[in-house]
Image: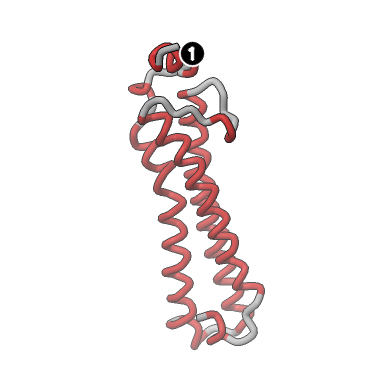
Amino acid sequence: MSAAHRRSDVSTMHPADVSPRRLWAGVLLAPAAWIAQGSLGWYFGYQACAGLTVPGARVSLTILSAVTLAVAATGGWMAWTCWGQTTAERHPLHITAWDRVEYMAAGGVLVSGIFAIAIMWGGLIAAFINECGGMR
């Protein structure tokens, strides 16, 4: 069976019909959210901590983590919908990315999942802050 024949069995939408912006958003939103969480977490730890109580720092970091997790989930959802537009089978163990569009969409799902886990782990620090300087 040729690669072109296999691709025609799998593809449900022409690659030109999938928005490149949605593809790139699916790949890049979660890593950008993770970077923002880390950068702003350092900001709260260094600048704002002098004026915040421990509960205030916890609330700030919890809100920051929830917002960045929502951004990462949005990127994952965008990648998931793009992947669904390019393939008939969306099982994570059966990824057959025959072209760039499907590869980017499936990669965006995986990248978003990995960075969402990283954001959740980074957000756990809010539960373990004992003193304000301890979160740096």
Q: Residues within 10 Å of mark 1 (few under 14, many from 20)?
A: few
The front one of 51 and 125 is 125
In the rendered view, tell whether residue 4 sits above or below residue 128. Answer: above
- The residue tagged 1 is 9
Identify the residue shown where x is 58% and y is 66%.
123
Residue at 52%, 35% in the rendered image: 80
**Vertical position of residue 129 compared to residue 7: above or below:** below
Q: Residue furthest front?
A: 1
Give how far across and how far down residue 60 sits, in percent: 55, 71
Residue 56 image point, x, y percent: 59, 78
Residue depicted at 62% across the width and 68% down the height: 124
Q: How many marks on residues?
A: 1
**Three-letter amino acid code of the residue under disc 1:** Asp
Vertical side of 128 occupied by 16: above or below = above
* x and y percentages locating residue 130 in the rendered image: 64, 84
Residue 132 horizontal side relative to residue 41, left or right: right
Quarter of the image with the N terminus is top left
